Image: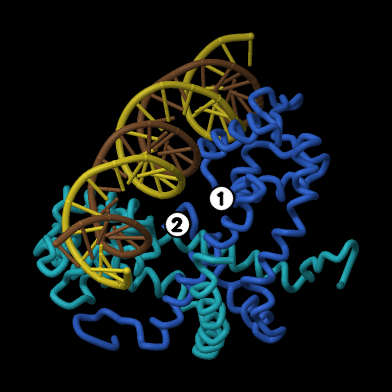
Chain colours: A cyan, B blue, C yellow, D brown
Amino acid sequence: MDTENGTRWLSDEEQATWRAHLEVSRLLMHQLERDLQPFGLTNNDYEILVNLSESDEHRMRMSDLATATLQSKSRLSHQITRMENAGLVRRENCESDRRGLFAVLTEQGWETMRKVAPHHVASVREHFIDLLSVEDLKALHESLAPVAKHLRTTRGRA
Amino acid sequence: MDTENGTRWLSDEEQATWRAHLEVSRLLMHQLERDLQPFGLTNNDYEILVNLSESDEHRMRMSDLATATLQSKSRLSHQITRMENAGLVRRENCESDRRGLFAVLTEQGWETMRKVAPHHVASVREHFIDLLSVEDLKALHESLAPVAKHLRTTRGRA
DNA sequence: CCTAAGAAGTTGAAATGTTAACTAATGACG
DNA sequence: CGTCATTAGTTAACATTTCAACTTCTTAGG
C-alpha cells in the first residue's frame, strides 16, 4: 500500500505515461479518420476492407469479422449494411451452415482498397511510425504485447 | 522508396507494433468502460469528472472542458446535459463573459468521484500500468511524448 | 458609438452505436 | 429421431455522436 486508505494511486511517471497513451490513441484515431475522409471512408470502413482484403477469396464470415474487428455482431451487421449500400461489399450465403453469411469484397471494394491503402500507410507513418526510432518501435511492441495478451484473455469475463 | 510504386509499406515489425497499439487502445477502453459500469458511469463521464475535480473551484468553462477532453462543443453540450440530469454537474453563468457558461461539479458529483476514483485507478493498474516494468513505462512515456506533441500541433490543420 | 467579424454555446436532425428481443439453423444426447 | 441448448445473424428501440444552422455576446475598426 503506497498511500491513504489502501489505494495505490499512480506515481507522476505512471500518470504521465497513462495520459500520454490516452492522448495519443485518441488524437491518432481522429487524425487517421480525417485522412481517410477525402476518400469517403471511416476508420471502421477501412478496417473491414483490410480484413476482407487479407482473407482468402476476400470473404469472411460475419462472426469472424466481428471478432477480428472487436465489434458486436449487431454493430457489424449495421456497418456491413452501410458498406453494402456504398457498393464496397456484398453478403453471400454460406452453403455449409445455412444460418451463416459471408461478407465479400466487391470489385469496387477491392479497387477502393488498392487506391486508399498507400495513403493510409503514409498517414500511419507520418503520425506514428516515423516518429519513433527503431529501438522505440521494438520496445513499444514488446511492452504492448503482454498487455494485449492480458486484455484478450480478460475480455468477456472478469 | 522501399517498394513498388513509391509506397513505403510497413515492415513486419512496424506493422506488428502498429497493430498492437491499435488493439491495446481499443481493448483497454472497453475494459475500463466495463469496470466503470457498476458505478453507472461511462469513460466520458469519468473524464469530465476528473477534469472538474482537478480544476480550481471544481469548475471549468465549457470551451476549455471541450478542449481538454478533445470533444466538439456540441458533443460536450449534450454530455453535460446528461450529466446534469444525473445530478453530477450543473451549469452556471459566467459573470465576465455573458456568452459563457461554467460546468460545475455538484456535491454529488464530487462524492461520486471520491468513491469511484480508487476503483478506476485499480482498473488502470490491473489492465495497463502494472503489466509494464518501470523501464517499459519510462520508455513508453518518452516514445509517446513526441507523438502526442506532433498530433497536438497537427490537429486542426493539415 | 456603430457595425461587422468572430467566439461561446445550444439545438434539432441525421448518422452511428448499443441493447435486448427475436428467428432460424445447428448440434448434442437421450 | 426428438427436443433442447447453443450459435449465427438480424432487427427495432433507444442512446450517443456528428453536422449544420442558429442565438447571443464580445471585440476590433472606423
The amino acid pointed to by label 1 is Leu
Q: Is residue A151 left or right of residue A52?
A: right
- Mark 2 = which residue? A30
Residue D6, image x and y in percent?
36, 63
Q: Quadrant of the C terminus of chain B?
A: bottom left
The residue sitting at 34% across, 69% down in the picture is A68
Badge 1 density bin: few <14, some 14–19, many ≥20, Cα 10 Å = some
Q: Is residue B74 visible?
A: yes
The quadrant where residue A36 appears: bottom left
Q: Nearer the viewer, residue C22 or B120?
A: C22
Q: Nearer the viewer, residue A66 or A115?
A: A66
Residue A47, image x and y in percent?
31, 65
The residue sitting at 54% across, 87% down in the picture is A142
Q: Is residue A74 above or below residue C29?
A: above
Q: Quadrant of the N terminus of chain B?
A: bottom left
The residue sitting at 49% across, 56% down in the picture is B155
For residue B70, the mark is 1
Secondary structure beneath label 2: helix
The residue sitting at 39% across, 71% down in the picture is A124
Q: Is residue A69 left or right of residue D15?
A: left
Count of marks overlaid on the render: 2
